[in-house]
Each structure stands twice: as structure tokens, then as C-alpha cells.
Image: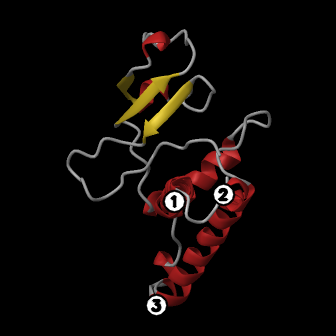
Amino acid sequence: MEANLQRVKKGDAKASIHRMEIDRIRYVLSSYLRCRLQKIEKYFPHVLEKEKSREMGDASLLSPEEFAFAKEYYANTETYLKTVALKRMPPILQTIDMLKAVPEPCLDSFVFLRVKERQENILVEPETDDQSVLPFVGIGSMAHSAGLLEIAVRLCLNQRKQLCPHVWVPS
């Protein structure tokens, strides 16, 4: 798109519209990536545990860079806690289980979705191109397949300003 923009004359109205579209796409992508990093930071031990427990043939939910970030974040958090707080505790309290210390993602919440192709377990007509709101627990295993397009990560009725990310969308 940027190459197309360079071919257009500077005073052309198409150029400004094209530039706005590029900026909009860049904003949406950076917002999406920022949200993914917030999810990793918020649930890092659970993210790493899920990656370790996945089957060999299953697709990873994280890009290699995100996985490296999660491992580094885990190590940095653990080191910080040990040097700042845990070494000042009695010896019996100097260990921490990160899986218990960090809250789990809430998988009981609802997600918006649009069916792209017919799924056996979902009774939504794909021809209508409608959005549906379903519990994530019911569609979690299919959410990473090519059959569903997730539009939003969660309905945050009680927490409008805070994102409550828990749906892992494949990269």
C-alpha cells in the first residue's frame, strides 16, 4: 500500500485517503499486538504452561517472539520477587508458585464471533454473516481453527475501561 501511495501525486485526494487507511491499519495492528502483550504480561505463567502442555502437532498460540517475551518476563518477574521480597522472608516462605500467584484467565466469559464456515458443534448459519455472542468455554477448542473469526475478546460489562483479555487468537 505504501508503494501505491508513492506513485500518486502529492496534491491528489486519493493520496490523503490512502494515507489515512494506512494509518488506520497500522493503528489496528499495533493495538492488537499491544493487547496480546498485555495478555502475556497478565497471565504469563498460565501462557507458558499452556505452551508446554500442548501436543507436538498442535499449532502454537504464540509467535516465537511472544514466547521468548513470555519466558523472559517470567524470569525477570521471578528474579525481581526473589531479590526484593522473598530473600527477606523466613526460609519457609522463600518459594513462590507463579501458577498460584498469578490469576488464571477467566474462560467463563462471552466472546463475539462470526462463523466463516460451517461447524458441526455451532448452530449458527454462516450464510447470514451475523455476529453472535457465545461463551468462550463452548467454542474455545474451535476458536483457533479457521472456521471462526473472533471480533472481540470479551464483553466487559462491569469493567468498561479495563481489557479482560483471555481469548488467544492465533498469530
Tell which circle, 2 or 3, labels the residue nearer the N-terminal end: 2
Marks 1 and 3: which is nearer the front? 1
Q: Which mark is residue 42?
A: none
Around disc 1, counting alpha carbons within 10 Å, would you say few (fewer than 14), some (14 to 19), or many (20 or more)? some
Around disc 3, counting alpha carbons within 10 Å, would you say few (fewer than 14), some (14 to 19), or many (20 or more)? few
Q: Nearer the viewer, residue 60 or 21?
A: 21
Mark 2–mark 3 CB contact (< 8 Å): no
Q: Determine which residue is flagged by label 2.
A: 8
Tell which circle, 1 or 3, labels the residue nearer the N-terminal end: 1
Q: Nearer the viewer, residue 5 or 171?
A: 5
Disc 2 versus disc 3: distance between alpha carbons? 65 Å
Residue type for callout 1: Ser
Residue at image point 51% right, 59% down: 16
Image x and y of residue 83, in percent: 55, 88
Q: Determine which residue is flagged by label 3.
A: 88
Residue type for callout 2: Val
Image x and y of residue 153, in percent: 42, 43
Quadrant of the rendered image containing residue 147: top right
Q: Answer left or right for 89 relative to 3.
A: left
Q: Determine which residue is flagged by label 1.
A: 16
Disc 1 versus disc 3: distance between alpha carbons? 59 Å
Residue type for callout 3: Arg
Tell which circle, 2 or 1, labels the residue nearer the N-terminal end: 2
| Secondary structure beneath label 1 | helix
Image x and y of residue 168, in percent: 54, 44
The chosen color scheme is secondary structure
Residue at image point 36% right, 42% down: 154
Image x and y of residue 162, in percent: 31, 58
Quadrant of the rendered image containing residue 12: bottom right
